[in-house]
Image (spheres, helix red, strand yellow):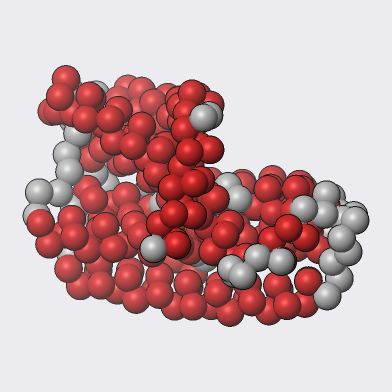
Amino acid sequence: MRYIRILLLHFEHVFEQRLRSLIWFVVTFINPLILILFWRGALKGGQEIAPGWTLTTIVSYYFLVAITGAFLVSHIEEDISESDIQKGELVRYLVKPFPYYWIKLFEEAPYRILQGVYGIITLAIFYFYFGGFISLSKDPLTIFLAVIIAVLAAFISNTFKQTIGLLAFWITDIYGLYEVLDVIHIVFAGIVVPLVLLPSLIQTIANILPFAYIIYYPTIAFIGRLSYVELLRIMGIQCIWLGALVFVYHRVWKAGIKKFTAIGQ
């Protein structure tokens, strides 16, 4: 019950800045729309750019990339590194009888949910007016498994970003690292181009890294591009990544907290 109360308290704070969250969503939605226009011009003849990838699939993909990006990709790392570690605000969390990991997760979750709702509303509007260009899976079991994949993706993203944020215990200027990771994320999560359209070497690297399991695979799961076996395989890999990231997080937290001083950096 206390978990729900904490989450609701953070929801109150987020709703005070609901317009700000809407602006963030609109900004992130612009890039997929531009890419849709590009592919619409490239596929005027209705041909397939890859087996099963028509203009309808491409449009559906980029719409869902925008929504999954808003829903699943955590941005908690800057708050951890700048506010908690560099400014010393971590002190107020250390005296609370509640794990720091879950506190930060509950702080970030309302932002993801609110922006995800904006995305679902946008998708519903476009689906109503341009339903012929958007194709989603109608199989209940596929949708159910896709939802599980999305939940695991959200935990992977949050755990990864929290771990990266904790590196501020050792790195004074960590924003360069954030920018490098953003570039890697854009390429290997399939945000610019679906991974199936990239060279096999990049696809192999993407399947090793965690980024594709946060954006790309949840997206194509909802489109219906994965069989049941592939959906279960993706879930298994996500569980392995989540377990590994949780392990690394705890090691980094235990080592970093020994270096922390109440006055920050």
Up-down: is 6 above or below 192? Answer: below
| Displayed quadrant of residue 164 | bottom right
Quarter of the image with the C terminus is: bottom right
| Displayed quadrant of residue 121 | top left
Q: Nearer the viewer, residue 20 or 184?
A: 20
Farthest top residue in view: 129
| Displayed quadrant of residue 144 | bottom left
Q: Nearer the viewer, residue 152 or 176?
A: 152
Image-based side of 4 in relation to 230, left or right: right
Q: Residue at x 28, y 63 (%)?
A: 148
Q: Position of residue 219 (x, y in %)?
A: 32, 49
Q: Tell me, yes or no, if residue 98 can be seen here.
A: yes
Image-based side of 230 in relation to 21, left or right: left
Q: Residue at x 72, y 66 (%)?
A: 94
Farthest left residue in view: 139
| Numbered label tally | 0
Q: Nearer the viewer, residue 155 or 35?
A: 155
Q: Position of residue 187 (x, y in %)?
A: 53, 48
Up-down: is 9 above or below 32? Answer: below
Q: Residue at x 39, y 26 (%)?
A: 33
Q: Position of residue 240 (x, y in %)?
A: 44, 78
Image-based side of 42 in relation to 215, left or right: left
